[in-house]
Structures are given as C-alpha cells and as structure tokens.
C-alpha cells in the first residue's frame, strides 16, 4: 500500500468531484486533483465559469484524465448536471468564494457545479478562501451557518497572507490537508460536528529538546502529527485552539489555531501553565523529555576536553501533566478544566501496554488518558495510529476503555474528541 492509501484506508477507488471557485487560490485545486488522482480515485473537475479565468480547463483535464466543463448545457446527452452529482462518492469544493458559498447556501443551480451539489447525496466538503472582510461579513457567516445546517462540511479557512498585502483568516488551507479532511468527513460523518463551539482548547505537541551545549541536545522522535491533528479537529468542531509546540516535522498550523513555540520541558511547563488559566480542555500530546543535562555548556563541548562526553549527568524535568492536575487540585486552575494525557507504551515481559497505561492514568490523575502501543516504526513519526482512551470510573479500580482502531492520525483524533466530548464535556 502507498503511504496515502494506508493513511486514508480508501483502497477502493472513489468517484470524487472537485469543484473549483473563481478565486486566486484556484491554482491550488490542481494539487487537490493530484492528491485524489494519484491515490487511484476517479476525479471529475467542475470549475465555475470564473474559475476558468484563473486556471484553464486543459490543466484540470490533464490532471484528472477526464473532460472538464462548467456548463449545464454541455454534453446534454449524458445529463451531466444530474449524473455527476448523483454518482459522486465525495464532492470537495476548493476554493469556495463568497459568491459560490451564497449560491450553494441558497440552493441555486445556475451552473454545473451548483446543480451537481443540489442532487448529491454524498458528503460535500467546502473549503472557503476569500479576503478576511468577506469571510467575516454577516452575509457570508450566515451562508456558512446555513450550509452547515444542511449537512455540508465547511472547512475553517487558514490564517495568513492573502492576495494583497493583507493577512488574516481567509487563506485556502494546504490542498493535501483539504484532501485529508475530506476523506475524514467521508469516513466519519460526525468528524465535523460543531460540539466544541465556545470551548477553549490547549494542546501540547511535538518533542522537547534539552540542550547539552549550543549545538547538541537530548530529544526524541515525536513528529507532532497527533497533537496537530487533535488541534485541527478541535478547530473544525468550533473550538478556539492554542498549540504549545515543541519540535515537530514541518507541519502546517491548523486553520484557526494559534501557536506558542517552546524548546525545553521547562519552557513548555511555563507556557502550558499560563495558557491553561483560560482553557476548558488541556491535552498533553507532547513527548516531553523526562530528563535534561544537569549542566549546559556555553560553548561547543570538544572531543578530548575536560568534560567527559561519555557520561552526561542528568536531572529530572518537571512532569507537566501532573503539575497541571495538581494546580487544578490546589485551586490555581479552574476546577472545571478537563485534563487529558497521553501514554506511549511498549509493554514488557510482565505487562501489556494497556496495563501500563492503566497504572499511568491513576499516577497522573488526569480525566482521560489516550494510550498508544509504540515501538519501532509504530506510531512515533508515522501517519497512522491506533490505541485506547482510558476513562477513570467512580469507585472502580479499572478504567473504562474505548478502543480506537488503526487509522490516519486525523481520523484517530476524531475518535479521541468523540470520547472527550461524549464523556467529559456533556
Ligand atoms: N508528560 C509530561 N511531562 C513529562 C513527561 C510526560 O507532561 N516530563 C506527559 C506527556 O505529555 C503525556 C504523559 O505525561 O501526556 C505521559 O507521558 P509518557 O512519556 O508516556 O510517560 P512518563 O510520565 O514519561 O512515564 P514513563 O516514561 O515512565 O512511561
């Protein structure tokens, strides 16, 4: 299996319609076509008339291997305006302009794309892109609300540089990312339920680096993907999200999330403690180094110098998760704060990963623990994951266990948020 099919578990080809609105980001739709076409899916591109002012039909035809039209009156013999929408397994529209959102919300059918959406019974995923003022306009927000009420998935736009000199919410997210979100919507209809509106979510992600000298550090192989995916799903479900990020792979900042970058465990503790005061939910997904070098040299340690580099003296780092739980118990953080930890376990001769996680849940005192069985090439740095959510049960020694089957870290994040929302926030 290729990385992408493994990640999405869609080994059977899907019929995917990609709608393209007439905005400057229309060129990014070419990457989205590639995302689906290269995974073996049958892609039909339906641009609006104005999209064809930005990207020619030839580009989309070459990339999808299928004819491209914007018009209801082309290929009448094939009844395209009904057939394409009816037969689609998934419709993804990127970019969706303010005008296109308005037409979709009001059930217009004045071109091939909108008429296809009107007959479709499959998931429709819309990625808006426009200037911030247009996005924030009550008319657009009402249209988004209407579309969501109709069951359309509207992806939150990314923050960043827009067409002119301005920047703010309104950028089209990375096309691969739109593709992953669309597949998550297809797999799990509840992925985008808006149950976190009004909630402030704080997530730590990535690994910490503990310096030894200006060029060396103790670190770990965390990619940050799981934490970022949790942030992404939370933002799509309506939460205000802050990520306290250690070192990660190069990952796009999820749409709508703000980010605080830290290096060491002690920096992370400071940032998390500060941000947790405002939060409703804290998730410690970061891989925090348990120990740091006791001394940090001001200049590069040289081979054969007085310092014995074969032995590094270590001292213990703070346990951030435990500290947040203790601060809540002491009344320094709100009593209603929900605290979720992670546990990366390999298991050993005596205990399974799940048994270790059960002990860890009690030790940390958090409200839920997400446990993964890790190992070489398993979970850390990978795009897929699996595991369990452990929930303490009143007056019972054993936690309740919700199993999370293997899936992309995005789909796993949906399952984790379902477990948190259903059991701890309702
Ligand atoms: N954690 C933390 N501070 C640390 C170490 C871990 O907040 N100094 C958090 C992690 O972010 C995770 C949870 O504690 O949410 C469990 O981390 P893990 O590395 O699995 O466990 P440890 O506490 O380090 O215990 P051990 O290494 O013995 O398994």
Image (tube, grey):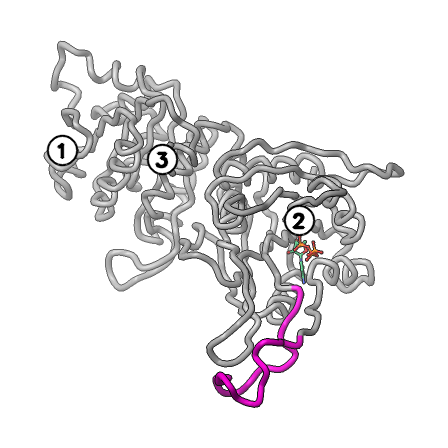
> Residue 231: percent from the left, percent from the top?
52, 49
Asked whether, in this view, residue 213 is left or right of residue 119, the answer is right
Q: Picture quarter containing residue 73?
A: top left
Please report whichever mark, 1 or 3, sits nearer to the chain's N-terminal start.
3
- The residue segment tinted magenta is 290-313
Q: Is mark 2 within 8 Å of ligand 1?
A: yes
Up-down relation of residue 82 to residue 300 (above or below) = above
Indicate yes or no whether the magenta region holds residue 297: yes
Marks 3, 2: nearer the viewer: 3
Mark 3 → mark 2, Cα distance in angstroms: 28 Å
Q: Quadrant of the C terminus?
A: top right
Q: Is mark 3 within 8 Å of ligand 1?
A: no
> Residue 421: percent from the left, percent from the top?
65, 38
Q: Give the number of the disc on residue 111.
A: none
**Residue ID for mark 1:** 62
Q: Quadrant of the N terminus?
A: top left
Asked whether, in this view, residue 245 is left or right of residue 266, the answer is left
């Amino acid at each position: 299996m290729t990385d992408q099919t493994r990640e999405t578990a869609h080994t059977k080809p899907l019929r995917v319609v990609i709608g393209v609105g007439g905005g400057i980001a229309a060129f990014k739709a070419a990457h989205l076509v590639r995302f689906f076409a290269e995974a073996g899916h049958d892609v039909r591109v339906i641009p609006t008339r104005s999209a064809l002012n930005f990207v020619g039909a030839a580009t989309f035809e070459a990339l999808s291997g299928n004819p491209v039209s914007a018009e209801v009156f082309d290929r009448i013999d094939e009844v395209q305006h009904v057939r394409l929408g009816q037969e689609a397994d998934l419709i993804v529209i990127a970019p969706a302009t303010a005008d296109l959102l308005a037409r979709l919300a009001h059930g217009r059918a004045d071109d091939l794309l909108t008429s296809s959406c009107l007959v479709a019974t499959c998931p429709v995923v819309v990625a808006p892109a426009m200037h911030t003022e247009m996005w924030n306009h009550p008319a657009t927000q009402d249209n988004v609300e209407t579309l969501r009420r109709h069951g359309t998935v509207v992806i939150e736009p990314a923050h960043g540089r827009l067409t002119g000199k301005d920047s703010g919410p309104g950028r089209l997210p990375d096309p691969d990312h739109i593709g992953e979100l669309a597949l998550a919507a297809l797999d799990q209809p509840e992925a985008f339920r808006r149950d976190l509106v009004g909630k402030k979510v704080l997530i730590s992600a990535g690994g910490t680096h503990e310096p030894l000298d200006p060029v060396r550090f103790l670190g770990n192989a965390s990619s940050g993907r799981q934490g970022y995916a949790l942030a992404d799903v939370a933002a799509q479900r309506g939460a205000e999200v802050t990520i306290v990020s250690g070192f990660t792979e190069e990952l796009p900042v999820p749409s709508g999330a703000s980010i605080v970058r830290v290096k060491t465990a002690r920096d992370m503790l400071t940032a998390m403690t500060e941000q947790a005061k405002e939060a409703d939910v804290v998730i410690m997904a970061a891989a925090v180094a348990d120990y740091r070098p006791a001394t940090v040299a001001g200049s590069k340690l040289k081979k054969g110098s007085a310092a014995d580099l074969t032995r590094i003296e270590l001292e213990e780092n703070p346990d951030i998760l435990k500290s947040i739980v203790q601060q809540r118990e002491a009344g320094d953080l709100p009593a209603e704060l929900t605290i979720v930890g992670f546990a990366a376990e390999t298991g050993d001769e005596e205990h399974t990963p799940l048994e270790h996680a059960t002990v860890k849940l009690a030790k940390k005192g958090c409200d839920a623990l997400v446990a993964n069985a890790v190992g070489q090439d398993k979970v850390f740095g990978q795009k897929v994951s699996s595991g369990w959510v452990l929930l303490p049960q009143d007056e019972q020694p054993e936690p309740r266990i919700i199993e999370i089957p293997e899936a992309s870290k995005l789909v796993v994040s949906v399952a984790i948020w379902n477990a948190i929302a259903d059991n701890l926030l309702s």
